Image (tube, rainbow, N blue to C red):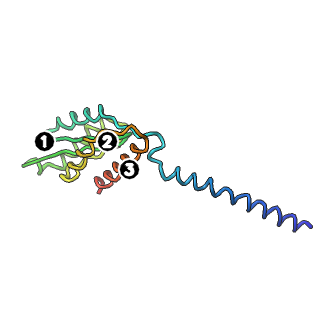
C-alpha cells in the first residue's frame, strides 16, 4: 500500500513538472534577448564629446564614435607618417576616453574597413521602436566582435 502511494505521488510529481516546459521556453526566449532587457539607448551627445576628446590627440585625421548604452566604440583615421605611431596613438585615445567616460566600455580601432562600417552605423538614425533598436544593438555587438579581433 505504501509503495503504491509513493509511486503514485512520484508519478503526479513528474507529470506536474511536464507543464513547466512552457515556462522554460519562455525563460529561454527572455535569456536569448539579454541585450534588450532595458531598451537600448544611443547617446549622441557623448559621441560628440568623445570625438572632440579623441580629435585633440596629435596625428589623428578623422574620428568616428558611436555609444550605445555603456559601449563606446571609437574609430580613428591616422595617415602618412603618423601610422608609425599608430599603437601609441590608439593607447593615448583610449586613456583619454577612459578618463572622460569611466563607466563606459571603450574600444578604439584604426582599421580602415572598421572606420567605414562604424561611420555608416553612426550616420543612421537610432530607431524609436524597441524591436528595431534591439536589432541595431545586435549589429553593433557583431561590429564590436570585429573590433576585438
Q: Quadrant of the N terminus?
A: bottom right
- Residue 126 position, x and y percent, is 33, 39
Name which quarter of the figure residue 95 lies in.
Answer: top left
Choose mark 1 or mark 3, whichever is in front: 3
* Precedes in sequence: disc 1 or disc 3: 1
Instruction: Report, in whole angstroms, how far the alpha carbon at label 2 lies from the one at label 3.
Output: 15 Å
Q: Few, some or many C-alpha atoms within 10 Å of disc 1 (few <14, some 14-19, many ≥20)?
A: few
For the residue pair 74 and 143, the one nearer the viewer reads as 143
Tell whether 4 sits left or right of 44. right
Which secondary structure, mark 2? strand
Residue at position x 58%, y 56% in the image:
25
On screen, residue 12 above or below 119: below
Residue at point 35%, 37% (across, down)? 42
Circle 1/circle 3 CB separation < 8 Å: no
Residue located beneath label 1 in the image: 61
Give the image quarter of residue 57: top left
Image height of 128 relative to 33, above or below = above
Judging depth in this view, the residue of 125 and 68 nearest the camera is 125
Q: Position of residue 101 (x, y in %)?
A: 32, 35
| Mark drawn on residue 72 | 2
Few, some or many residues within 10 Å of mark 3 (<14, 14–19, 20+):
some
Residue shown at the point (20%, 53%) measured from the top left = 113
Quadrant location of the C terminus in the rendered image = bottom left
Query: Horizontally, is 21 left or right of 64 in the view?
Result: right
Q: Point out which mark residue 138 bears.
A: 3
**Where residue 97 sits: x, y (%)?**
27, 38
Disc 1/disc 3 C-alpha distance (Å): 29 Å
Q: Earlier in the sequence, mark 2 or mark 3?
A: 2
Q: CA distance from mark 1 to mark 2?
A: 19 Å
Amino acid at each position: 500500500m505504501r509503495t503504491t502511494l509513493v509511486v503514485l505521488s512520484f508519478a503526479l510529481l513528474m507529470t506536474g513538472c511536464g507543464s513547466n516546459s512552457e515556462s522554460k521556453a519562455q525563460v529561454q526566449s527572455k535569456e536569448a534577448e539579454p541585450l534588450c532587457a532595458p531598451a537600448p539607448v544611443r547617446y549622441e551627445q557623448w559621441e560628440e564629446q568623445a570625438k572632440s576628446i579623441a580629435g585633440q590627440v596629435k596625428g589623428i585625421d578623422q574620428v568616428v564614435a558611436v555609444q550605445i548604452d555603456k559601449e563606446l566604440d571609437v574609430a580613428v583615421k591616422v595617415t602618412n607618417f603618423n601610422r608609425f605611431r599608430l599603437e601609441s596613438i590608439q593607447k593615448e585615445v583610449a586613456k583619454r576616453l577612459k578618463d572622460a567616460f569611466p563607466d563606459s566600455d571603450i574600444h578604439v580601432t584604426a582599421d580602415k574597413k572598421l572606420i567605414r562600417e562604424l561611420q555608416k552605423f553612426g550616420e543612421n538614425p537610432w530607431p524609436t521602436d524597441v524591436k528595431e533598436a534591439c536589432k541595431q544593438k545586435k549589429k553593433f555587438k557583431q561590429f564590436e566582435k570585429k573590433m576585438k579581433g
